[in-house]
Image (cartoon, grey):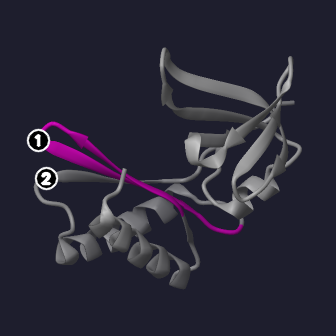
Amino acid sequence: MLGPPLAEVEAKIGALLEAWGYELVAMRYYAHGGRGRLWLVIDKPGGVSVADCETIYERIGDYLDVLDPIPGPYVLEVSSPGVDRLLTKDRHFEEAIGKQVRVKLRPRQGGRRTVTGRLRSVTEKEIEVETERTVERLERAAIDEARALHQWD
């Protein structure tokens, strides 16, 4: 994930986006050999269009060129949260209560564990997901990624 310098960049980018009427849903950096990937997920009331992503890509790309927070080459990607919405903030989890979610937990012995079910409750430290078989309490610190799943009619 992000080290301290990128965490500071994330805060700055979040503030810029907020001033422009957007929300920074997630920022992740992935190292791929000699070239990295900086992925920004943005949102705004009413949703994000391709034109929004292009605009933010240009604005943030220019900002990052000046700031130069990542040594070496990297690719900047800007996207919307998508149909299956990323849950990264308290508000996102609270808005997803009662909806179907897929939660990927940090790898454990035997590989990654995924829990899918209805989100029943959220606290600062854990979430409760009702699966087909049981109700599972999952520590938020153990969550690698959580998404609210779109229900197709």
Say whether residue 103 is left or right of residue 97. left
Q: Position of residue 29 (x, y in %)?
A: 33, 51
The numbered disc on residue 73 is 2
Q: Is residue 65 visible?
A: yes
Q: Secondary structure at mark 1?
A: loop
Q: Is residue 86 visible?
A: no
Depth check: give the residue in front, 59 or 119.
119
Q: Which residues are magenta?
A: 25-45
Tell how many labels.
2
The residue depicted at 86 percent of the width and 23 percent of the height is 134
The residue depicted at 83 percent of the width and 25 percent of the height is 131
Position of 105 relative to 29 (above/below): above
Structural crowding at the residue carrying mark 2, measured as other residues with C-alpha within 10 Å and reported as few (<14), some (14–19) or many (≥20): few
Circle nearer the N terminus (2, 1): 1
Depth check: give the residue in front, 110 or 90.
110
Callout 2–callout 1 Cβ contact below 8 Å: yes
> What is the magenta segment's predominant secondary structure?
strand
Structural crowding at the residue carrying mark 1, measured as other residues with C-alpha within 10 Å and reported as few (<14), some (14–19) or many (≥20): few
Q: Reply yes or no: does residue 40 show up in magenta.
A: yes
Q: Amino acid at mark 2?
A: Pro
The residue depicted at 48 percent of the width and 80 percent of the height is 15
Depth check: give the residue in front, 34 or 17.
34
Q: Residue furthest top?
A: 110
Position of 8 relative to 85 (above/below): below
Q: Quadrant of residue 139?
A: top right
Q: Position of residue 97 (x, y in %)?
A: 85, 49
The numbered disc on residue 34 is 1
The residue depicted at 21 percent of the width and 68 percent of the height is 69
Q: Secondary structure at mark 2?
A: loop
Say whether residue 108 is left or right of residue 37. right
Q: Amino acid at mark 1?
A: Gly
